[in-house]
């Protein structure tokens, strides 16, 4: 089965700083890639997804992610974070059989 | 909007008890999933189901079983609860989709404590 690695466990930024969260996956075939976000006390929700086509995908709240097939990576970016972006972020990979696998998550703390 | 409802938000059980966690979705999704979420480990897939009466093991099925008698309902069963099953349990659903391109819709989770 596919697996996912998120290298940053906890990231602390000041407001207006730029964000990049790393995600690498291992799977030899075609994959579908996702980023989910979990705000404090809330359920996980979809931030953005990549299926095919343009490797740079845009999601909600100004987030974007770039799929680099040669590096098996799908890093999440945001040019300028806000205090309200404080949350836990999960990268996820789905292969052919809909059994989605998640990374360990990255906790983002944005200082006002 | 998709609604995935988990029957309990918090649950406290004793070691050895049989525990049922219930999940219902209202959008006629074919796929349903059970994950457990632990700090530093992310979400780990326990079981999933493509259709009624069908089930597939995920990465950590030991000590768990599931039941899907109706399309909208997916139950997770801990046959004999143990303290290492203390965790947050998340249910999710998705459309069958094509080649795994359907995002998951999550419930609010059940925080289970086994004492």
Image (cartoon, grey):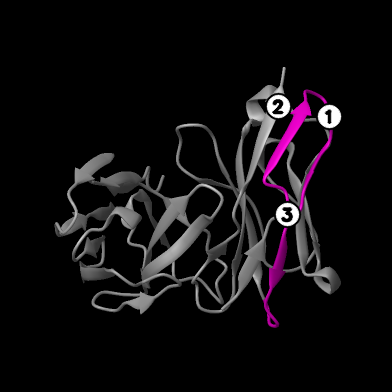
Gap in angstroms between the C-alphas marked 1 and 2:
9 Å
Same subunit, tags 1 and 2: yes
Please name the residue that numbered disc 1 is placed on.
Answer: A17
Determine whether B59 is above or below B85 in the image.
below
Query: Residue B18 magenta-drawn?
Result: no
Do tag 2 and tag 3 residues touch (Cβ < 8 Å)? no
Please name the residue that numbered disc 3 is placed on.
Answer: A7
Could you say which is closer to the camera, residue A99 or residue B3? A99
* Left or right of A13, for residue B44: left
Say which quadrant the C terminus of chain A sits in.
top right
Q: Secondary structure at mark 3?
A: loop
Give me the chain letter of mark 3. A
Gap in angstroms between the C-alphas marked 1 and 3:
19 Å
- Which residue lies at the image location 67% right of the left edge and 78% below the top edge? A27
Q: Secondary structure at mark 2?
A: strand
Q: Which quadrant would residue A60 be assigned to in this image?
A: top right
Question: Which stretch appears magenta?
Answer: A8-30
Tag shown at residue A110? 2
Query: Residue A18 magenta-drawn?
Result: yes
Same subunit, tags 2 and 3: yes
* Neighbourhood count class around disc 3 (C-alpha, 10 Å): few under 14, some 14–19, many 20 upward: some
Which residue of the protein is positioned furthest toward the bottom in this rendering?
A: A28
Where's residue A59, x and y in %? 69, 46
Mark toward the start of the polypeptide (1 vs 2): 1
């Amino acid at each position: 089965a596919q697996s996912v690695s998120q290298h940053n466990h906890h990231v602390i930024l000041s407001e207006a700083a730029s964000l990049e969260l790393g995600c690498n996956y291992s799977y030899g075939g075609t994959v579908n890639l996702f980023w989910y976000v979990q705000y404090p006390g809330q359920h996980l929700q979809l931030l953005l997804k990549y299926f095919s086509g343009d490797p740079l995908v845009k999601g909600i709240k100004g987030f974007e992610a770039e799929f680099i097939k040669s590096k098996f990576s799908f890093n999440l970016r945001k040019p300028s974070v806000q205090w309200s972006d404080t949350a836990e972020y999960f990268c996820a990979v789905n292969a052919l059989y809909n059994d989605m696998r998640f990374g360990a998550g990255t906790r983002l703390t944005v200082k006002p | 909007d998709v609604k995935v409802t988990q029957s309990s938000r918090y649950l406290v059980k004793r070691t050895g008890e049989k525990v049922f966690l219930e999940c219902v979705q209202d959008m006629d999704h074919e796929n349903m999933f059970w994950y457990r979420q632990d700090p530093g480990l992310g979400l780990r897939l326990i079981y999933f189901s493509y259709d009624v009466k069908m089930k597939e093991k995920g990465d950590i099925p030991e000590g768990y079983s599931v039941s899907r008698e109706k399309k909208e309902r997916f139950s997770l069963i801990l046959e004999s609860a143990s303290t290492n099953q203390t965790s947050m349990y998340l249910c999710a659903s998705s459309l069958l989709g094509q080649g795994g391109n359907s995002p998951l819709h999550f419930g609010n989770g059940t925080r289970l404590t086994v004492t």
